[in-house]
Image (cartoon, rainbow, N blue to C red):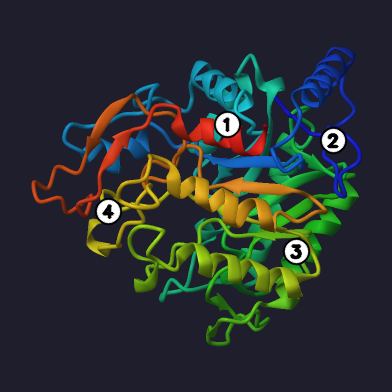
Amino acid sequence: MVRRQLAGLGAHVSRLAPSRPALVCVLLFALSFFAAGGSGDGVRYLVGAHYYVWYPDNFANGYLRGALRPAQAPALGEYDSRSASIAERHIALAASHAIDFFTLDWWPSRPAQNAAIESGFLRAANIDEIRFCIFYESKDLGRSADENDIVFAAATKDRFVSDLMTIARRYFGHPSYLRIDGRPTLVLYVTRQMRGLFPQAMREMRRAMAAEGYDPFVIGDEIFWAVVEAAEDPDAAARVTGEPQLSRIRLFDAITAYNLYAGWERHRGYGSASRFVADSVKLYRRYRNVAGIPIIPGVIPGFNDRAVRPGSDHFVIPRRWTAGASEGSFFTEAIERIAKPLADPRLHAILITSWNEWNEDTAIEPLSPAPPTADDASGRRLLTQGYAYEGFGSAYVDIVRDLLLH
């Protein structure tokens, strides 16, 4: 259920002109929001979570909870994203726990997977209780041989514009589509890796949108420790820098970071002993000071991709702040230290990575309750690195509700 003032925020959230029944629903939502009140700091946040429609296939690709001993599973089991009943239960959970919208992943080369948005999520009987927008999986356009950049040559530019027009025509008219300042919202993944004709692609996309009556609010995934320089020559060699790329940032209406995990040694282990949160705060502040547009801080509950990418040998960010802290304490600290202080007053928006990205173990979707275990299928705790993982029930959605609603 959307709990935001429909006016009064610097960049208020609104819907397309609704039908009369939908208008009644909107008014009821607004009334329930004002009755419930906002977070403890008096701010009404716009809270989103990244939502994936790639199941059941991605359960088979490997995920930590399935490799624990004993195994753990989502509270809804290993579900199918094409199921409207699954989407209904996700929406009900999110709406009752202060999550206002989902970003739905959309892939340029996965039409069958994209179809799960229509067959599952959009067929949910309670779709009017939440908002959604499209999260465009830009990496799927193709990257260079060194995997560090996404080069926009003419064909890539044209594909990008065509894809976003397809998205606009298919989804922007839905009454639950997320609008910021009356503008339909798009999130573009890893824009920080884009170079070449990307500025031309953005200009052409905006012209094509305007010709059909759309003015999208575009959020770039731009904030990171190292980014690709925004050179416009697609034949030039890629260069990586730690400097924010203002020429690229100015193509967007807001910027965010999907996940600031970078594999740096000083970010290893419990949050209380690592530099991950403190460094993240400094990075967001740096971008906020130069961007000139709103930043949307993102938070993770932890990170562990060792079951899906065993060869990468990435270290774990545990879900506890210290060894003796409670389940979800890292997430709590991330919200209190990163998300709330750095939420831009023009939007008061926060993004959570993620609702259900189980492969990297960033999901906050409820798990079936189970006692903590550090044992895994390797027999040597190679996947857990010795950290205990609990079947946490609804702990994480409860944290969102308690910190960002009341």
Which is more toward the observer, 374 or 102?
374
- Residues at marks 3 and 1 touching, judged by CB atoms closer than 8 Å: no
Instruction: Name the secondary structure under disc 2.
Output: loop
**Of the image marks 2 and 3, the number of the one nearer the N terminus:** 2
Alpha carbon distance from label 2 to label 3? 24 Å
The label number, if any, that marks residue 202 in the structure image: 3
Q: Position of residue 103 (x, y in %)?
A: 61, 41
Instruction: Name the secondary structure under disc 4.
Output: loop
Label 2 sits on what residue type?
Ser
**Of the image marks 4 and 2, the number of the one nearer the N terminus:** 2
Task: State left or right for residue 150 relative to residue 394.
Answer: right
The label number, if any, that marks residue 306 in the structure image: 4
Mark 2 closeness class: few <14, some 14–19, many ≥20 residues within 10 Å: many
- Check disc 2 and report the residue beneath it: 14
Kindly identify the residue that appears in the image at 49 percent across and 20 percent down: 86
Label 1 sits on what residue type?
Ile
**Of the image marks 2 and 1, the number of the one nearer the N terminus:** 2
Q: Position of residue 121 (x, y in %)?
A: 58, 26
Q: Nearer the viewer, mark 2 or mark 1?
A: 2
Kindly identify the residue that appears in the image at 23 percent across and 50 percent down: 384
Alpha carbon distance from label 1 to label 4? 28 Å
**Res. 26 visible in picture:** yes
Task: State left or right for residue 172 relative to residue 235.
Answer: right
- Check disc 1 and report the residue beneath it: 117
Alpha carbon distance from label 2 to label 1? 22 Å
Alpha carbon distance from label 3 to label 1? 25 Å
Kindly identify the residue that appears in the image at 34 percent across and 27 percent down: 78
